[in-house]
Image (cartoon, rainbow, N blue to C red):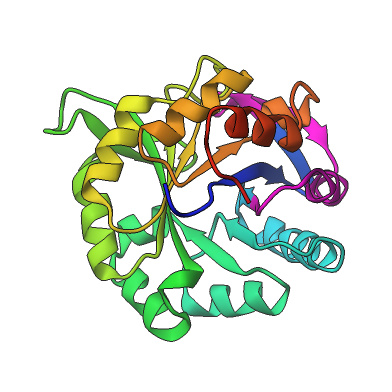
Amino acid sequence: MGVAVRVIPCLDVAAGRVVKGVNFLNLRDAGDPIELARTYYEQGADEITFLDVKATVDNRDTMYDVVRATAEQVFIPLTVGGGVRSTEDVAKLQAHGADKVGVNSAAIARPELIGEIADRFGAQVLVLSLDVKRSAAVPSGFVVTTHGGRTETTIDALAWASEAIERGVGELLVNSIDADGMKTGFDLELVTAMREISRVPVIASGGAGALEHFAPAIAAGADAVLAASVFHNGELTVGDVKRALAEAGVVTR
Protein backbone atom coordinates (compact mmCIF):
# COMPACT_ATOMS: atom_id res chain seq x y z
CA MET A 1 0.00 0.00 0.00
CA GLY A 2 1.53 3.29 -1.10
CA VAL A 3 -0.29 5.70 1.19
CA ALA A 4 0.44 5.59 4.92
CA VAL A 5 -2.36 4.24 7.06
CA ARG A 6 -3.95 6.51 9.68
CA VAL A 7 -4.80 5.59 13.27
CA ILE A 8 -7.78 7.59 14.53
CA PRO A 9 -9.14 7.67 18.09
CA CYS A 10 -12.87 8.38 18.20
CA LEU A 11 -14.51 10.37 20.96
CA ASP A 12 -18.28 9.92 21.30
CA VAL A 13 -19.39 13.09 23.08
CA ALA A 14 -22.65 13.74 24.96
CA ALA A 15 -23.22 16.95 26.92
CA GLY A 16 -19.51 17.74 26.90
CA ARG A 17 -18.28 14.35 28.14
CA VAL A 18 -16.90 11.32 26.31
CA VAL A 19 -19.22 8.31 26.56
CA LYS A 20 -18.88 4.69 25.49
CA GLY A 21 -21.24 1.74 25.28
CA VAL A 22 -21.74 -1.57 23.51
CA ASN A 23 -23.70 -1.61 20.23
CA PHE A 24 -24.39 2.10 20.96
CA LEU A 25 -26.34 1.19 24.13
CA ASN A 26 -25.75 1.68 27.88
CA LEU A 27 -23.51 4.71 27.47
CA ARG A 28 -21.16 5.43 30.38
CA ASP A 29 -18.79 8.29 31.12
CA ALA A 30 -15.29 7.83 29.71
CA GLY A 31 -13.67 11.17 30.47
CA ASP A 32 -13.04 14.75 29.37
CA PRO A 33 -12.86 15.05 25.57
CA ILE A 34 -10.22 17.76 25.50
CA GLU A 35 -7.90 15.90 27.88
CA LEU A 36 -8.37 12.63 25.98
CA ALA A 37 -7.77 14.28 22.61
CA ARG A 38 -4.56 15.86 23.89
CA THR A 39 -3.39 12.49 25.26
CA TYR A 40 -4.01 10.78 21.90
CA TYR A 41 -2.27 13.60 20.05
CA GLU A 42 0.78 13.10 22.28
CA GLN A 43 0.62 9.34 21.61
CA GLY A 44 0.87 9.98 17.86
CA ALA A 45 -2.74 9.93 16.63
CA ASP A 46 -3.06 11.01 13.00
CA GLU A 47 -6.53 12.51 13.41
CA ILE A 48 -9.23 12.82 16.08
CA THR A 49 -12.89 12.15 15.37
CA PHE A 50 -15.61 13.65 17.57
CA LEU A 51 -19.14 12.27 17.25
CA ASP A 52 -21.87 14.22 19.03
CA VAL A 53 -24.03 11.22 19.91
CA LYS A 54 -26.90 13.28 21.28
CA ALA A 55 -26.77 16.14 18.81
CA THR A 56 -29.74 18.12 20.02
CA VAL A 57 -29.82 21.91 19.88
CA ASP A 58 -28.94 22.28 23.56
CA ASN A 59 -25.80 20.15 23.12
CA ARG A 60 -24.65 21.93 19.98
CA ASP A 61 -23.01 24.92 21.69
CA THR A 62 -21.24 22.58 24.11
CA MET A 63 -19.79 20.71 21.15
CA TYR A 64 -18.56 23.92 19.52
CA ASP A 65 -16.74 24.76 22.76
CA VAL A 66 -15.15 21.30 22.88
CA VAL A 67 -13.96 21.57 19.27
CA ARG A 68 -12.50 25.04 19.78
CA ALA A 69 -10.67 24.11 22.98
CA THR A 70 -9.29 20.96 21.35
CA ALA A 71 -8.16 22.75 18.20
CA GLU A 72 -6.16 25.16 20.37
CA GLN A 73 -4.14 22.27 21.85
CA VAL A 74 -4.17 19.47 19.28
CA PHE A 75 -2.49 20.07 15.93
CA ILE A 76 -3.84 17.23 13.80
CA PRO A 77 -7.04 17.10 11.73
CA LEU A 78 -10.29 17.12 13.70
CA THR A 79 -13.41 15.52 12.22
CA VAL A 80 -16.75 16.34 13.83
CA GLY A 81 -20.00 14.51 13.19
CA GLY A 82 -23.46 14.45 14.68
CA GLY A 83 -26.27 16.85 13.92
CA VAL A 84 -24.70 18.42 10.82
CA ARG A 85 -27.75 19.43 8.78
CA SER A 86 -26.67 22.39 6.64
CA THR A 87 -23.73 24.16 5.06
CA GLU A 88 -24.03 26.74 7.84
CA ASP A 89 -23.41 24.01 10.42
CA VAL A 90 -20.24 23.12 8.52
CA ALA A 91 -19.12 26.74 8.35
CA LYS A 92 -19.63 27.18 12.08
CA LEU A 93 -17.76 23.98 12.93
CA GLN A 94 -14.87 25.04 10.70
CA ALA A 95 -14.83 28.45 12.38
CA HIS A 96 -14.40 26.63 15.70
CA GLY A 97 -11.51 24.52 14.43
CA ALA A 98 -12.95 21.45 12.72
CA ASP A 99 -11.08 20.30 9.60
CA LYS A 100 -13.69 17.80 8.39
CA VAL A 101 -17.33 17.08 9.12
CA GLY A 102 -19.24 13.83 9.16
CA VAL A 103 -22.80 13.54 7.89
CA ASN A 104 -25.18 10.64 8.42
CA SER A 105 -28.88 10.96 9.24
CA ALA A 106 -29.36 14.38 7.64
CA ALA A 107 -27.79 13.19 4.36
CA ILE A 108 -30.05 10.15 4.30
CA ALA A 109 -33.07 12.36 4.86
CA ARG A 110 -31.91 14.83 2.18
CA PRO A 111 -29.11 13.49 -0.05
CA GLU A 112 -28.72 16.90 -1.76
CA LEU A 113 -26.96 18.04 1.42
CA ILE A 114 -23.84 16.12 0.31
CA GLY A 115 -23.50 18.09 -2.91
CA GLU A 116 -24.21 21.38 -1.17
CA ILE A 117 -21.39 20.82 1.33
CA ALA A 118 -18.96 19.42 -1.26
CA ASP A 119 -19.61 22.31 -3.66
CA ARG A 120 -19.06 24.95 -0.98
CA PHE A 121 -16.18 23.44 0.99
CA GLY A 122 -14.69 20.68 -1.19
CA ALA A 123 -14.98 16.91 -1.01
CA GLN A 124 -11.94 16.70 1.29
CA VAL A 125 -14.01 18.28 4.07
CA LEU A 126 -16.86 15.78 3.88
CA VAL A 127 -16.98 12.34 5.52
CA LEU A 128 -19.98 10.05 5.10
CA SER A 129 -20.55 8.36 8.45
CA LEU A 130 -22.15 4.95 7.91
CA ASP A 131 -23.60 3.02 10.83
CA VAL A 132 -24.14 -0.38 9.26
CA LYS A 133 -25.93 -3.54 10.40
CA ARG A 134 -26.06 -6.95 8.80
CA SER A 135 -29.46 -7.63 7.25
CA ALA A 136 -30.89 -10.16 4.83
CA ALA A 137 -33.41 -7.56 3.70
CA VAL A 138 -31.07 -5.87 1.19
CA PRO A 139 -28.95 -7.26 -1.67
CA SER A 140 -25.53 -6.56 -0.12
CA GLY A 141 -26.47 -7.99 3.26
CA PHE A 142 -25.67 -4.67 4.95
CA VAL A 143 -28.28 -2.05 5.83
CA VAL A 144 -27.87 1.58 6.89
CA THR A 145 -29.04 2.71 10.33
CA THR A 146 -29.64 6.23 11.64
CA HIS A 147 -29.88 8.00 15.00
CA GLY A 148 -26.76 6.38 16.43
CA GLY A 149 -27.66 2.92 15.25
CA ARG A 150 -31.08 2.93 16.89
CA THR A 151 -33.20 3.24 13.73
CA GLU A 152 -32.84 0.66 10.98
CA THR A 153 -33.63 1.78 7.43
CA THR A 154 -34.32 -0.28 4.31
CA ILE A 155 -31.36 1.34 2.52
CA ASP A 156 -28.62 -0.91 1.17
CA ALA A 157 -25.37 0.36 2.71
CA LEU A 158 -23.25 -0.27 -0.38
CA ALA A 159 -25.74 1.37 -2.72
CA TRP A 160 -25.95 4.40 -0.41
CA ALA A 161 -22.17 4.68 -0.13
CA SER A 162 -21.86 4.55 -3.92
CA GLU A 163 -24.49 7.28 -4.34
CA ALA A 164 -22.84 9.45 -1.70
CA ILE A 165 -19.46 9.18 -3.44
CA GLU A 166 -21.07 10.28 -6.70
CA ARG A 167 -22.65 13.22 -4.87
CA GLY A 168 -19.29 14.36 -3.51
CA VAL A 169 -18.22 12.78 -0.20
CA GLY A 170 -14.46 12.52 0.17
CA GLU A 171 -14.25 9.67 2.67
CA LEU A 172 -16.31 6.82 4.14
CA LEU A 173 -16.35 6.18 7.88
CA VAL A 174 -17.75 2.64 8.01
CA ASN A 175 -18.90 1.65 11.48
CA SER A 176 -20.26 -1.84 12.17
CA ILE A 177 -23.08 -1.58 14.71
CA ASP A 178 -22.91 -5.35 15.19
CA ALA A 179 -19.22 -5.19 16.15
CA ASP A 180 -19.34 -1.85 18.01
CA GLY A 181 -17.90 -2.23 21.51
CA MET A 182 -17.72 -6.03 21.22
CA LYS A 183 -13.89 -6.05 20.94
CA THR A 184 -13.89 -9.14 18.71
CA GLY A 185 -12.36 -7.43 15.68
CA PHE A 186 -13.50 -5.32 12.76
CA ASP A 187 -16.16 -6.64 10.36
CA LEU A 188 -13.70 -7.57 7.62
CA GLU A 189 -16.43 -8.62 5.19
CA LEU A 190 -18.00 -5.17 5.48
CA VAL A 191 -14.63 -3.42 5.01
CA THR A 192 -13.87 -5.50 1.92
CA ALA A 193 -17.30 -4.81 0.42
CA MET A 194 -16.89 -1.05 0.93
CA ARG A 195 -13.38 -1.08 -0.53
CA GLU A 196 -14.66 -2.76 -3.68
CA ILE A 197 -17.19 0.00 -4.40
CA SER A 198 -15.22 3.01 -3.14
CA ARG A 199 -12.73 5.25 -4.92
CA VAL A 200 -12.37 7.39 -1.77
CA PRO A 201 -10.62 6.42 1.49
CA VAL A 202 -12.38 3.94 3.78
CA ILE A 203 -12.07 4.20 7.57
CA ALA A 204 -12.82 0.94 9.43
CA SER A 205 -14.68 1.37 12.72
CA GLY A 206 -16.31 -0.90 15.27
CA GLY A 207 -14.93 -3.93 17.02
CA ALA A 208 -11.27 -3.22 17.80
CA GLY A 209 -10.28 -5.05 20.96
CA ALA A 210 -6.68 -6.22 20.54
CA LEU A 211 -3.54 -5.30 18.63
CA GLU A 212 -4.00 -8.21 16.24
CA HIS A 213 -7.33 -6.77 15.03
CA PHE A 214 -5.88 -3.74 13.21
CA ALA A 215 -3.68 -5.19 10.46
CA PRO A 216 -6.46 -7.46 9.08
CA ALA A 217 -8.67 -4.39 8.62
CA ILE A 218 -5.96 -2.78 6.50
CA ALA A 219 -5.51 -6.01 4.55
CA ALA A 220 -9.28 -6.01 3.93
CA GLY A 221 -8.99 -2.59 2.31
CA ALA A 222 -9.20 0.08 5.01
CA ASP A 223 -7.11 3.23 4.58
CA ALA A 224 -7.48 4.09 8.27
CA VAL A 225 -8.51 2.35 11.48
CA LEU A 226 -10.66 3.99 14.13
CA ALA A 227 -11.13 2.85 17.73
CA ALA A 228 -12.60 4.22 20.92
CA SER A 229 -12.95 2.16 24.09
CA VAL A 230 -9.58 0.36 23.83
CA PHE A 231 -7.95 3.80 23.92
CA HIS A 232 -10.29 5.34 26.51
CA ASN A 233 -9.85 2.41 28.89
CA GLY A 234 -6.06 2.52 28.55
CA GLU A 235 -5.95 -1.03 27.19
CA LEU A 236 -3.99 0.12 24.13
CA THR A 237 -2.21 3.30 23.11
CA VAL A 238 -2.02 4.78 19.63
CA GLY A 239 1.68 3.96 19.70
CA ASP A 240 0.93 0.31 20.47
CA VAL A 241 -1.32 0.10 17.42
CA LYS A 242 1.23 1.77 15.15
CA ARG A 243 3.97 -0.60 16.32
CA ALA A 244 1.74 -3.62 15.73
CA LEU A 245 0.89 -2.36 12.24
CA ALA A 246 4.56 -1.76 11.46
CA GLU A 247 5.40 -5.29 12.60
CA ALA A 248 2.74 -6.52 10.17
CA GLY A 249 4.40 -4.59 7.34
CA VAL A 250 1.89 -1.74 7.27
CA VAL A 251 3.25 1.77 6.70
CA THR A 252 1.81 4.29 9.18
CA ARG A 253 2.32 8.02 9.45
The verdict on residue 23 being magenta is yes
**Picture coordinates of residue 144, whole percent (x, y):** 31, 40
Q: How many marks?
A: 0
Can residue 153 be seen at all in this image of the molecule? no
Q: Residue furthest bottom?
A: 120
**Picture coordinates of residue 3, whole percent (x, y):** 47, 54
Magenta part of the chain: 20-49
Give the residue at x 51% y 14%: 184
Q: Is residue 39 left or right of residue 92?
A: right
- Name which quarter of the figure residue 139 lies in: top left
Give the residue at x 21% y 59%: 163
Residue 51, placed above or below residue 236: below
Can residue 90 be seen at all in this image of the molecule? yes
Residue 21, placed above or below residue 167: above
Depth check: give the residue in front, 230 or 221: 221
Give the residue at x 70% y 44%: 14
**Picture coordinates of residue 198, whole percent (x, y):** 27, 52
Q: Is residue 94 left or right of residue 200?
A: right
Q: Is residue 121 left or right of residue 75?
A: left
Give the residue at x 61% y 59%: 80
**Picture coordinates of residue 63, whole percent (x, y):** 72, 59
